[in-house]
Amino acid sequence: MNAIKVDDKRRVRVPELTPGDYYMPEISREGPNGIAEMLTLRRLPPPKRRWTKKEALKAINNSPLRFAYSWDEIKQETR
């Protein structure tokens, strides 16, 4: 592997890595001035897909949990 230079925005280009993949850097060894001497990249699974509004509302409607009071009753209690 050739030497790699960090740019002004602290980005590093490593040709072996592919765009869109997720990696977590781990500092294996620190030098005397606190700068990482050895860095390991651990591949992570991609984050879970976020729910759409429609999916979230459907899950709320299918849930067995229900509010004991209506919003108007809660407003009156808090004022």
Image (cartoon, grey):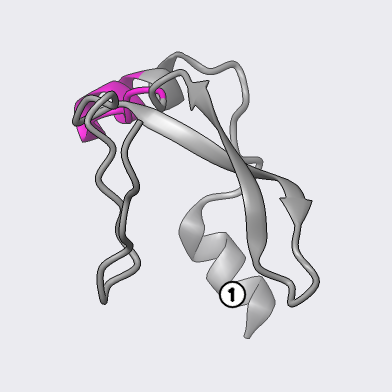
Q: Is residue 19 left or right of residue 64?
A: left
Residue 20 vertical position relative to residue 78 in the rendered view, above or below:
above
Q: Is residue 32 left or right of residue 22?
A: right
Residue farthest toward the bottom in the current orientation of the protein? 79
| Rendered location of residue 69, percent (x, y) | 61, 48
**Other-residue count near label 1 (Cα within 10 Å), few / some / many at <14 / 14–19 / ≥20:** few
Residue 50, image quadrant: top left
Residue at image location 53% in from the left, 18% down from the top: 63
At mark 1, the secondary structure is: helix
Residues shaded magenta = 48-58
Residue 21 vertical position relative to residue 35 in the rendered view, above or below:
above
Residue at image location 39% in from the left, 30% down from the top: 22
**Would you say residue 54 sits in the magenta stretch?**
yes
| Rendered location of residue 24, percent (x, y) | 53, 37
Residue 68, image quadrant: top right
| Rendered location of residue 12, percent (x, y) | 31, 52
Q: Is residue 33 left or right of residue 15?
A: right
Q: Nearest the camera: 2 or 65?
A: 2
Q: Amino acid at mark 1?
A: Gln
Residue 74 vertical position relative to residue 63 in the rendered view, above or below:
below
Q: Is residue 4 left or right of residue 47?
A: left
Q: Nearest the camera: 67 or 18?
A: 18
Residue farthest toward the front in the current orientation of the protein? 2
| Rendered location of residue 5, percent (x, y) | 31, 59
Quadrant of the rendering where the N terminus is positioned:
top left
Residue at numbered disc 1: 76
Residue at image location 31% in from the left, 38% down from the top: 2
